[in-house]
Amino acid sequence: MIDGIIRDMRARSGDLRGIGARVRFVLGDDTILMDARQSPVSVEPTDGAGDGEADCTIRMAPEHFRKMLDGQLGPMMAFTLGRLKVEGSMGIALKLAQALDD
């Protein structure tokens, strides 16, 4: 599932470029680091060690993130229902929500 999520995020890199920050996604036991400070946007799996400081960390179950990418679960609804947790910059999380909602 994580490989598919990474593939889909890379396909959306044009939409994600406007975020302009590093975002760590903790999806169950897996971690993905997206660096949208560079072009092209980098989306890589990571073990969480040595990837430096992220501006924002998103925590959620991989199946909920998959639904979000597929448009079956809106980012704001996921946050409201407690399925998405944000650490760090809420402003960056809102930019990300807007990019994923398009």
Image (tube, grey):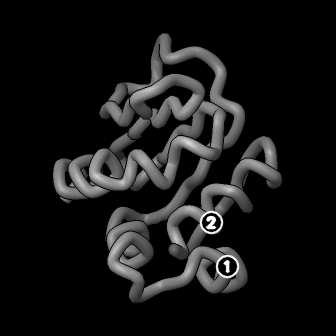
- In percent of width and height, residue 58 lies at 59, 52
Q: Residue at image x 50%, y 17%? A: 51
Instruction: Name the amino acid type tagged 1.
Output: Met
Q: Residue at x 73, y 61 (%)?
A: 94
- Report the disc number at residue 3: none
Q: Residue at x 61, y 57 (%)?
A: 96
Near mark 1 (Cα within 10 A), the count class, few <14, some 14-19 or many ≥20, is some
CA distance separating discs 1 and 2: 7 Å
Residue 86 position, x and y percent, is: 70, 55
Disc 1 versus disc 2: nearer the observer: 2
Q: First in sequence: mark 1 or mark 2?
A: 1
Q: Nearer the viewer, residue 48 or 39?
A: 39
* Residue 29 appears left or right of 75: left
Q: Residue at x 54, y 34 (%)?
A: 36
Reading the image, the residue beneath label 2 is 97
Question: What residue is shown with label 1?
Answer: 76
Do residues under tags 1 and 2 come within 8 Å of each other at their CB atoms?
yes
Report the label total: 2
* Quadrant of res 30: top left
Secondary structure of residue under mark 1? helix
